[in-house]
Amino acid sequence: MSILTEALPAGVLPEMARDLSVSESAAGQLLTVYAIATGVAAIPLSVATSGWRRKRLVLLAVAAFAVANVVTAVSSSYLPTMTSRLFAGVAAAAVWAELVGYARRLAPPHLQGRAIAITMAGIPLALSLGIPVGTFLGGLFGWRPTFGVVALISVLLLVWIGVSVPDASGQKSGKRQPILQALKLPGVVPVLFVVAAYVLAHNILYTYIASFLDEYDMGGRRDIVLLVFGTASVVSIFVTGALVDRRLRQLTVVSVALFIVAAVMLVLVAESEIAVYTSMVLWGLGWGGVATLLQTAVTDAGGDRGQALLVTTWNSFMAVGGAAGGILLDGMGPTSFPWSVLLLLVPALLVVVVCHRHGFPTKRPDAA
């Protein structure tokens, strides 16, 4: 629900921009403000709610998604829409900070990577099914009814969590450790650098994918392109889940390299529809498992504190990606997006390759 609420505007960006009487780059900031709210709120919210019952926290977050999506659906102007997105972003901070730590606590050490993969399967599923279907429905019925449907799904999810999901206690105050001190642990900073570069590159391109496709006369096939991307992401998450506990380093190298190859194709041969679809497959295969890979790496290096830092880094650079993409769109046009991916991901690949002792070790701690 968090990813669906967050990314849906990317699939209906031109329509939202037109109805709200703003430019597409301004509409892209609807994703930016969501990510800013999540990034800024992650650490203080994690500290403030660490003693709460976990089920109560998740229920409040999902309720916030429902309210925010209703406001987005009925809002007729830009400011209320932006405000609702900020509100939803704060709720997402609570969800992000909770899920991975809870999954790790449920699994033995040698299967924690797989537990994270299962937990994070909702990301590629939202991208492969939710966003393309939302894009299709947005074109068929309009973007407002589509957000209304997402709000309804939030309500149904709220009921299901209330009935079915087990509760868990929060942390006692004496067990809480300063989050920022995790930056001193070996491997945490290199992983966060890769997080920042990868997420920034992804969001520059993904936020404005409609504008990029329009540049090459493929705007009418937006839903199909996103479906191809998302389906490849689903394949990636299953492969990652099966191998992450034994092949974290190798999978991370492949993930970054696939996105680089996709960007090269979009630079050189984006006029070809076959090349665009092929690049979407490669990008999706790289992207689908990256959340699992980087969350596993950062929690291996820094524990739950590392996870809180990842949430902040991830969402902060999502916000930067939306803003930077808007600047590139207005100043250099959508053809600049793949170039920015290359400039960001080549250094990220070098960091993964070099950090073979800490951050992306050949063998994970406690891995079988």
Image (cartoon, rainbow, N blue to C red):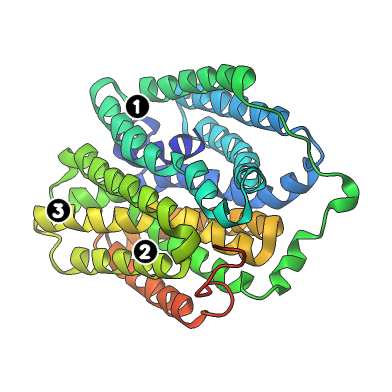
Residue 143: give its label.
1
User: Which one is in front, 122 or 26?
Assistant: 122
The residue that disc 3 covers is 216
- On the image, the x and y values in percent for residue 203 come to 41, 55
- Foreground tag (2 vs 1): 2
The residue that disc 2 covers is 255
Can residue 52 be seen at all in this image of the molecule?
A: yes
Residue type of the residue flagged with mark 1: Trp
Mark 3 or 2 closer to N-term?
A: 3
Distance from disc 1 to disc 3, alpha carbons, whole Å, reads 23 Å
* Residue at image location 32% in from the left, 40% down from the top: 128
Q: Write down the quadrant of residue 325 in the picture.
A: bottom left
Tag 3: Cα neighbours inside 10 Å, few (<14), some, or many (≥20)?
some
Q: Is residue 194 above or below residue 230?
A: below
User: Which one is in front, 271 or 252?
Assistant: 252
Q: Is residue 314 left or right of residue 273?
A: right
* Residue at image location 70% in from the left, 70% down from the top: 183
Q: Which residue of the protein is positioned furthest toward the front in this rendering? A: 368
Tag 2: Cα neighbours inside 10 Å, few (<14), some, or many (≥20)?
many
